[in-house]
């Protein structure tokens, strides 16, 4: 029988993917517009969204191994 992932992992995945895609899209638009510093800031906002996904995945995997 397959193991069921907790609901918070699904929510974290969805919000992380939305956050990562928004940060990259806004960063690219700002880069095209010539706004280097705001584009760099938007690209850096990719990191917390990715970290949220990693944290949720690892905590769920650790709780399933117990």
Image (cartoon, helix red, strand yellow):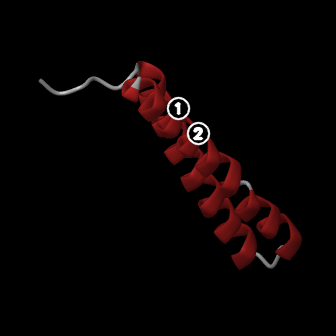
Instruction: Determine whether, in the image, residue 22 is placed left or right of residue 36.
Output: left
For the residue pair 2 and 66, the one nearer the viewer reads as 66
Residue matched to label 2: 55
Residue 36, image x, y percentages: 84, 76
Question: Which corner quadrant holds the N terminus?
Answer: top left
Single out the residue that lies furthest toward the right.
37
C-beta proximity under 8 Å, tags 2 and 1: yes
Query: Image quadrant of residue 53?
Result: top right
Horizontally, residue 12 falls left or right of residue 52, namely left
Q: Nearer the viewer, residue 26 or 14?
A: 14
Determine which of the numbered discs, if any, sits on residue 31 in the image: none
Crowd rating for badge 2 (residues with CA inside 10 Å; few <14, some 14–19, many 20+): few
Which residue occupies 67% across, 60% down?
26
**Is 39 rendered above or below residue 60?**
below
- Judge whether 48 appears above or below 57 on screen: below
Q: CA distance from mark 2 to mark 1?
A: 6 Å
Q: Which residue shows up at 50% across the image and 47% down it?
A: 17
x, y percent for residue 56: 53, 34
- Residue sitting at the far front: 66
Q: Which quarter shows the C terminus? A: top left
Mark 2 residue element: helix
Q: Position of residue 65 (x, y in %)?
A: 38, 29
Q: Identify the secondary structure beneath mark 1.
A: helix
Q: Nearer the viewer, residue 50 or 26?
A: 50
Q: Which dot marks residue 59?
A: 1
Q: Residue at x 28, y 23 (%)?
A: 4
Q: With 30 as the anchor, is 25 left or right in this view?
A: left
Residue 7 in the image: above or below residue 34: above
- Relative to 41, is 47 on the left or the right? left
């Amino acid at each position: 029988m397959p193991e069921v992932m907790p609901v918070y992992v699904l929510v974290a995945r969805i919000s992380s993917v939305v956050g990562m895609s928004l940060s990259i899209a806004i960063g690219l638009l700002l880069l095209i517009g010539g706004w280097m510093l705001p584009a760099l800031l938007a690209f850096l906002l990719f990191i917390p969204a990715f970290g949220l996904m990693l944290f949720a995945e690892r905590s769920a995997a650790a709780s399933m191994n117990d």
